[in-house]
Image (cartoon, rainbow, N blue to C red):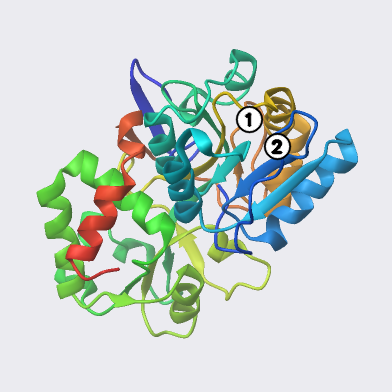
Amino acid sequence: MVRSARLSVGLLAGALVLCGCPGSTPGPAADSGADAALVIDCGGREAEWGPVFARFRAETGGSIEPHFGASPELAERWLRAGEGNASDLILAEEAGWLGALSDQNLLEALPASILEAVEPQFHGALGRWVGISGRARLLVVSPELPAEALPQTLEDLATPTWNGKLGWAPASLDFEAHVSVLRNVWGEAKTQAWLKGLRENGARSYPDDRAQVEAVARGEIQLGWVSHPSVFAPDAAPVRAVCVPTAGDLGNVLIVSGVGLRAHGPRRAAALAFVTWLTSEPTQAWLAQAIREYPVRRGVAAPPELTPLTGTAEIEARQLVDLQPTRALLEQLGLR
């Protein structure tokens, strides 16, 4: 958990930052008047988040206008627009994009009543974004692989033992976020060497985590490095998922999704009402079941079908908001 200025990013309560793959292209911002619909930029799939917005309308009567897109592109549009941006809220899959907006003073500090509702590791240092849910980083393992043969640390994946037996998805947004943690804890040189080691060790690239799960299930690889939704989806191929065995290892990270409120927006009260609803105990309990992710609200239990997660990596909050240099590194290595 939190110790002074350090952030506990682990797999019992976790931390890093929700929403997901592209849905529809973001449209033009709505009328900026205070009585207009609340404009929400969502970096998640419409099929997944549409029901969340519908539930908000049904429970509160609030008027909202969601636009769906990939989190990086939405955040970059906010950065380009600056103070001319007319969207009210942004939901992002990784805290890094919210951190970038916070650094440019484009997000407003949230009230303590919202921040204190979630575990302290689930909001930015300046209180300008708050977490919604989390995705655990796991290893998916071949049924033939005995427990004693598992890699004990994330670093072990680059050893000859796993030559040609490991899968990864470098184009995945969660992969980028996890590598950002490694860069900031291990340092640039060690992270680059480790990524090169995985590549030279015959790590097989897949388009996404789901493809890795399927590859493990059919015996193509013995290990995949994924986020948990790819394993626990109702139609996922049958594999087992485990945390990296060594407690405190950087393999044990939770990628947290979050929401930020545009600074100086005319619909501040409505925007705060939405964030308050999203982080409320009833919504967090329902949301965890609806999107099958780990809740961030204090006292709200994870869905019972998800793996109980153990192990904690101690990192500083600033290490979660550093995605652009990670993208540059991955491009330099030919992994993007």
302 is higher (above) or lower (below) than 272: below
- Rendered image: mark on residue 284: 2
Let me know if residue 317 appears in the view: yes
51 left or right of 250? right
Q: Residues within 10 Å of mark 2 (few under 14, many from 20)?
A: many
| Residue occupying the point 19% across, 62% down | 195
Q: Nearer the viewer, residue 55 or 244?
A: 55
Q: Of helix, strand and loop, which one carries label 1?
A: loop
CB contact under 8 Å: marks 2 and 1: yes
Task: Using a 10 Å C-alpha cutoff, classify the residue at mark 1 as few (fewer than 14 neighbours), some (14 to 19) or many (20 or more).
Answer: many
Please give the label number shown on residue 244.
none
Q: Look at the numbered disc 2 and give the secondary structure of its residue.
A: helix
Q: Which residue is mark 1?
A: 297
Q: Give the quarter of the figure containing the C terminus.
A: bottom left
Quadrant of the image occupied by residue 263: top right
Q: Earlier in the sequence, mark 2 or mark 1?
A: 2
State the residue in front, 97 or 25. Answer: 25
Q: How far across and down, in percent of the image, does residue 304 sit? A: 67, 48
Q: Nearer the viewer, residue 256 or 100?
A: 100
Residue type at numbered disc 2:
Gln
Please state if 89 lies on the left or on the right of 208 as rendered: right
Q: Position of residue 333 (x, y in %)?
A: 18, 66
Q: Say above or below: 314 vs 186.
A: above
Give the residue at x 28% y 60%. Answer: 151
